Amino acid sequence: MRAAPTILHLDMDAFFAAAEQASKPSLRGKPVIVGGLGPRGVVSTASYEARRFGVRSAMPMAQARRLCPNAAYLVPRFQLYRTISEQVMELLGRLSPLVEPLSLDEAFVDLEAGGVAFGSAAAREAGERLRRDIRAVTGLSGSVGLAGSKMLAKIASEQAKPDGLVLIEPGTERGLLAPMPVRILPGVGPATGEHLRRAGMTTVADLAEAGEDELVRLLGKSHGASLYRMAAGHDDRPVVAERDTKSVSVEDTFDVDLHDRVRIMTEVGRLADRCVQRLRASGHSGRTIVLKVRRYDFSTLTRSETLRGPTDDPGVVREAAGRLLDSVDTTGGVRLLGVGVSGLADYTQEDLFAQAAEERAAEGRGVEDRGEEEPEGEETPAAAGEAEPVEDPAQRRWLAGHDVTHAEYGPGWVQGSGVGRVTVRFETPTSPVPGRVRTFRVDDPGLELSEPLPLVETTGPLPLVEETETETGMRLGIGMGTDGKAEMEAGDGTPAGQESPLARRPKSRSEGGGPGSGAAMSRP
């Protein structure tokens, strides 16, 4: 435990939903819900306007629609979220070399390691300046918690939401924690919380009064002792800049249970390819291939196979996943499939598995043997006179919330699609007023998908603001810049039809208003 509140926890406010509101003027101040929009979809993030109706993250989307039927329901745009996250993480990196990202929108920062602060006044100034910089660079708000430990810094940022800063002075931890529910402590989930409730312990004060021996008796030696220390406000976990990736995986939940074995095998192969793409993007290879199958009755099976050496070859992963699927009974239907790779390494062992898989894949594609190696990473050009496949415009998917551009009307976003039509609102993040709505045929030749637009206009690289003298007499330069968990229902309630290594992890938490600075505690 530190004698000064120099551990900072940043949590962006309703991150995915706030990014959507910032990029779509017509949705600002209105309920926005981001997530999977199928029958089995779940809420990834809800704006604060939607939370007033009881919508929360991880809630089934069907329940969210019942609670808040007039919200805008959007499909996530992870490319935009990752770009914003990289901008935020760059600002954090200017504060300290010790930045521990927990997800795209959340991270711990050790201010002492960066020489930014060694006392309360300097820590608060660093936190306030960080919040101003984030808004200037991204147009979004983040809540900051400052304390002498990671646990308390995270609790402080929760208390600061939305768009606030809370600093917990060392020595006040026990009084602050005492009336809080036990679920506020790390490691206390629904099951442990219910177990403690049955034992008559509902607040942190109850845990402290029960004593370590009683908690050990109830929860076991390791968990009980750890929980008692946290109830007393003790947490000496350091901020760790690099976290080793243990596995890479992808999974899909299907709107309708899959029964056809060929379709299931095709989906497993597609998931294997996506998994390898993530594996390569992270700079890893892996030895153990894992298949996850959730059946019609919600029973979940996992199967794994360990190869002779690490690989990032899609053919090898597809074959291994296929062999694992052969050992699973899919009679009755499959509602979820997943493919993962663990046992990660920073190199790839060239072996016969990969060579054989490449040869089989080449034969399957009908690639002619030219007697020379194809350049790695390049696609084989189409044979002379052979026409390249052209996408059928009528088959394009127009997902709610995704970016488009029209030859006549310019950039906009999809409000919804269905029955051969797509509805688009033409506006940009910098539009002074909500844009106009137009409806087109799904195969309109003037309508194309496009890349997300920046939330804040870019005028140059992140400049440094004036140096500020801290209370310790050190000089501090803080970066300030100028750019930084489908159908939908329109924001006005009208129904319509649907890298930085520091920012490489998936989670989420709009602009809720309120200055929120200072030590006063308030919940959103």
Image: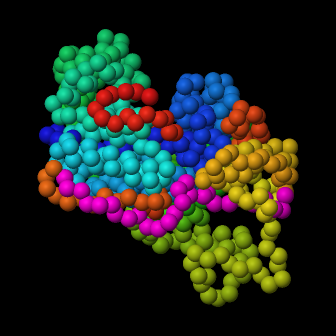
Quadrant of the image containing the C terminus: top left
Q: 7 and 37: which one is in front?
A: 7
Count of numbered labels shown in the rendering: 0
Look at the image and say whether residue 451 sits in the magenta stretch: yes
Image position of 153 (left or right of 429): left
Look at the image and say whether residue 105 sits in the magenta stretch: no
Q: Is residue 225 visible?
A: no
Quadrant of the image containing the N terminus: top left
Query: Where is 240 relative to 253, above or below?
Result: below
Query: Where is 512 relative to 326, above or below?
Result: above
Image position of 383 (left or right of 20): right
Q: 196 and 123: which one is in front?
A: 123
Please give the name of the residue rendered at 35% of the width and 50% of the height, measured from the top-left corner: 130
Q: Can residue 13 be seen in this view?
A: yes
Residue 178: image location, x then y, percent: 25, 20
Q: 375 and 264: which one is in front?
A: 375
Please give the name of the residue rendered at 39% of the width and 49% of the height, measured from the top-left corner: 132
Q: Give the range drawn in magenta.
A: 444-470
The single residue placed furthest to the bottom in the displayed view is: 371
